[in-house]
Image (cartoon, grey):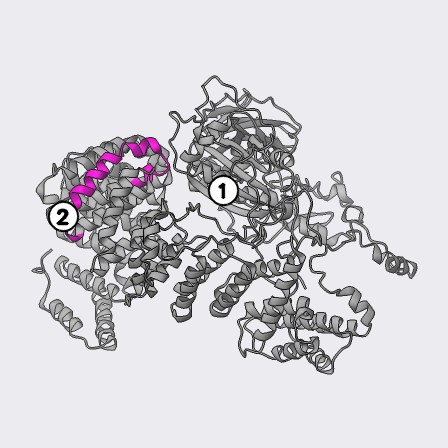
Amino acid sequence: MSGSHLSKDFFELIKSIGECKSKQEEDKILTNEVAVLKQRFTETLSPKRMKEAIVRMMYAEMLGHDASFGYIHAVNMTQQVNLLSKRVGYLASAVCLHSGHELTTLLVNTMRRDLKSSNHVEVCATLIAIPKLINVETLPALTPPVVSLLEHPHEVVRKKAVMVLHRLYQLQPSCAVELSEKLRRVLCDKDPAVMGASLHILHDASENDPMMQKDLVPSFVSILKQITEHRLPSSFDYHRMPAPWIQIKLLKVLSTLGASDQRASEGMYEVLYDVLRRADTGINIGFAIIYECVRTITTIYPNIQLLETAANHISRFVSSDNHNLKYLGIKALASIVQVDQKYALEHQMLVVECMEDPDETLKRKTLELLFRMTNSSNVVFVVDKLLSHLTSATDVQFRAGLTEKITQLAERYAPDNSWFISTMNAVFELGGELVRPDVAHNLMRLIAEGSGEDEDADMALRSFAAQTYFDMLSKPKLPDILMQVVCWVLGEYAYLSIKPLNRALERLCDAVERQFTHASTRCWVVVAMTKLVAQLGELPEQVAEIAAKYQNASDVLLSKYCHELEALALDMPSMRVALPVDASCEDLEVDPQLRFLDLFVAQAIASGAQPYLPPGERPDELDVGSRERGSLGHTLRFDEYQRPQEPQRNMLTTAGGMGPALAVGSDASSTDTGCASNGGLGSSGGLNTAGVAKKWGAHGFNAVGKTETPTSTPAAPSMQVPSVLSQSAVVSHGVSSPLPAASQTQQREPTEKEKMAAALFGGIAGNSSAAKVAQAPPAPAVVLPAQSVAAVAMPPGPPPKEKKKKKKMEGGVAAPTASPPVAPQADLLGDLLELAPAPPGAPPVAVTPSAPPPGVSDDLLSLLDAPAAMPGAVVEPMLGAMPAAVLPQTEVPPPGSSELSNDEKLSIRCAVKIQPSTTDLELTLSSITSAGLRNVVLQIEPPPSLAMSLTAPPIADVRGPRLTLANLSFGTSCTVCASITARSAAAGAEQNLLGQLSYFQSHNPEARVVSFKMPLSASDMMRPYKIATSQFGQLWHVHAAEKKTVAYATLASSPSSYTSFLESQMHLAPVDTIGMECISCGVLVGSEQAILVHSKLGLMGGRGLELTVRSREIRLTDVVHRQLLDALSNQKSLPGVVP
């Protein structure tokens, strides 16, 4: 667009803005310009002057000044016939308006008309504005004309139409199913630019549902091969590199589709090798393609030859003098070490140099690489490096990331308990508020429980912690989270310190006067002082003064603790009983009946007090609160009331949350019988109340929405409790080869960098210079006990623990500790990967515990993840869908059903029925009004990941997801069955089927609409999948999306009870059980999405287990893993940390 139509004043304005020396000077010019524009828009302007005014308005808006008075003129400009004026109008609308602006509605018809124009420039101007202005409400009106443009003769129109469809997909992903065939045809468009534009929407669709795009892998491979062979026009070349951006996007798509899929990946190997070879031209764009190709190779199913080729290219990047290429090499190295850490061995000295490089970005990326390379041998060196950077770092986000990394490494690879305590103290001191509360909870739990095997070692650990924290109190400033740990440890174990108790009390008295970030920290100090007073046997004067000082504090909790301290100190023997020494591991006996209050209650009743009456036995005049709660609902409503709708309009277009409240003027006859029946004027001699809304009844004014029929109270949602320990990556450990005899005689003194490399790469298998310099023995196992309940807030007090066992268990499984290696136990699968695949007709192996064979490794996952030849055929789960039966009409709600709505005219109950091939939702619709209902229309909208079919009795008309009943009489009901199957892995997530029901009453022309939700959990969608052990081993490699954690469980000591629990609660079929290892398998109903679960029981003295969940999709793995942890935690709730 040239500037010939603009005036000289406009160019002077642009020049003056460009010459401004300060923001204030620019604001002054633009403020004056906005005032001039506001006055000019009130005048009648010629088309030429109007275009200039709108362009000036755009400049003011882009520079941050409000010019909303001119928006309507930009919208009007789009109506002009002149092409230049129309383009200016669309440009201004796209710049100034947003998708939710009220003026965008005025543009819908204009855009629909312009999309059908014969002038392709006019169509392009419209397509450019649509992605900025469209929203979910206007999407149905604009989608059909945009889709029709995919067949337009001009390639630029087709390309922009594909870009608009990408925006439509971002707004409503469900449209991808409808547009799938059209997008596949666009992928074969004769113009490469149109094809390249379609890759973006296909990439997003592949990330959301890879299975739907798997069949396009050969097409993507063919396109990539044609590009690398220079079959595209030269206009797409960049520095003699053919279509580099299309190549990069194709590589991203292939990495998504090839992840954990051996069959799809095998078709990519040849073209990936060709891309690596042809992109190696020594220019930056070639390096970009090589990096993306390396990333794809490390993401798809691994191939040894390709990994070696990728490692060679990474070597060139890392050894380059260019910092940008070195940064790229470190990123690529971090991705390839996830496949095999041996590829980092030859670059160990370069990695050490990058850690000391002055380039901050390169240094941070190297720390990320160290984190991914950490194992039990180099954890001490890596954590020291991370702590040194945490000390000097100032960026909050970077510090938070370092704190999280150090915490994960310390919990996962700690060589001994003392090192773990020292490391966490440093993290608390340096990280402060950046540390999660559950990390402190873990530390206190470790100190309290110890290893559980050697009581002397545990007491030495507690003594070390007590002395360490006593010395730490001398520091003038400590973070709140560290101060809380210090107070708890000293309150429990200060008597183990070499210092007397009164010295610890003095330091705590000094600490209570400090300034804390959180008020609760002072409570921790007072609780610790209370425990020490009980151990000391007397109340020192300084402690008494502090208790008296804070008894009237504004913090209620602090005041309570001070009153308790003073009251307990008056009876020292009782105080010792209430606060015994070293009793944090003892179980508390709780009397749920509160029998200790029986005497008090009896005395009060004897003195004339009224006995307690349960809510169901109270008279109406006393149960005022319950009656008010029943009329007003359970909680306050924050959602808007639904607007009244006309009867002839479609009531099933949307599905909302709660149903609308009863209108003020609606009939209330079903909730009240009228005045005559309640002692007022009778129908024979009183007022004629026919046709009058009965707003007054026996209980006073009938509140809006009041119902007479009781509804079932929905169960409170269970809080999801995350696991404390983070997901553990599968790391392959190796042993360095011994030194040759000839080299031992000529060994030289290693340099400082070589020593660092030896410490860093000592735990990685392979021959390396660092391994020859120094070989450290592998560090012992981690001693950190896991915890399944993450404390959100940490009130003062000891962490919850199981009852401490003073003697070593006999015949049980001890907690993990840094102890000498014991004789290996049996592996569950043995030589699993060596077994031949079971024939198709062979029955599955019976699930019976068997004795472990001698001499076999005790780690199942190390065998499953070891590189081994895959068997010829992988057995995939195949479950067909069974037709749902029509459920008979019934008036009795099905057992186990729950109420979905609180409508006063209609009851909707839902029951989940688990069938072999479907999950059935039985909906029972019952009329509870004497007038009866007519034109009952039910519509259910499942999410895209679920397939649904409705069945109903013959009296109902079923068409797709919509059901219609002509009449529903009083006291009758109709049962509808919605049969659900899975379409994709997303079906395993917690789903909500949205439903909407509308009906009419015979005496009321207004339609009522009820909206409701039907929840589905992951266990509802899972079915047992019985396979042989050999088949489980074959599926384990293919299903690489893994989630692993260690959790407490009451069933961790009984494999039979645990497998029965998985089968009953999660619908997972047991595959095999040997010793304390169990494997189970399930599948999403109606699909081939398998879920594999491996459990290693008996950890932490029989109180914990290691849980590993695998599937093909990480989303499905996360959901099943989370629900398993929730189900295990519900077996026995662990108490929180309370003083």
- Residue 506, by quadrant, is bottom right
The span from disc 2 to disc 1 (Cα, nearest Å) is 45 Å
What residue does disc 2 label? Answer: 281
Give the position of the N terminus as an image quadrant: bottom left
Q: Compared with residue 87, is residue 1113 higher up or lower down, i.e. above or below?
A: above
Q: Earlier in the sequence, mark 2 or mark 1?
A: 2
Tell me residue 1016's x, y (percent). 53, 37
Mark 1 neighbour density, 10 Å: few (under 14) some (14–19) many (20 or more)? many
Residue 646 can be seen, yes or no: no
Marker disc for residue 4: none
- The amino acid type of the residue labelled 2 equals Thr
- The amino acid type of the residue labelled 1 equals Val
Tell me residue 168's x, y (percent). 31, 43
Q: Residue at x 54, y 74 (%)?
A: 478
What residue does disc 1 label? Answer: 1119
Tell me residue 647's x, y (percent). 48, 36
Q: Residue at x 33, y 62 (%)?
A: 750
Q: Nearer the viewer, residue 2 or 1005?
A: 2
Numbered disc 1: secondary structure: helix
- In this image, 328 relative to 793: left or right? left
Numbered disc 2: secondary structure: loop
The boundaries of the magenta stretch are: 255-284
Q: Is residue 1106 magenta?
A: no
Q: Nearer the viewer, residue 765 or 466?
A: 765
Which one is in front in this view, the residue at disc 2 or the one at disc 1? Answer: 2
Tell me residue 673's x, y (percent). 71, 40
- In this image, 695 relative to 341: left or right? right
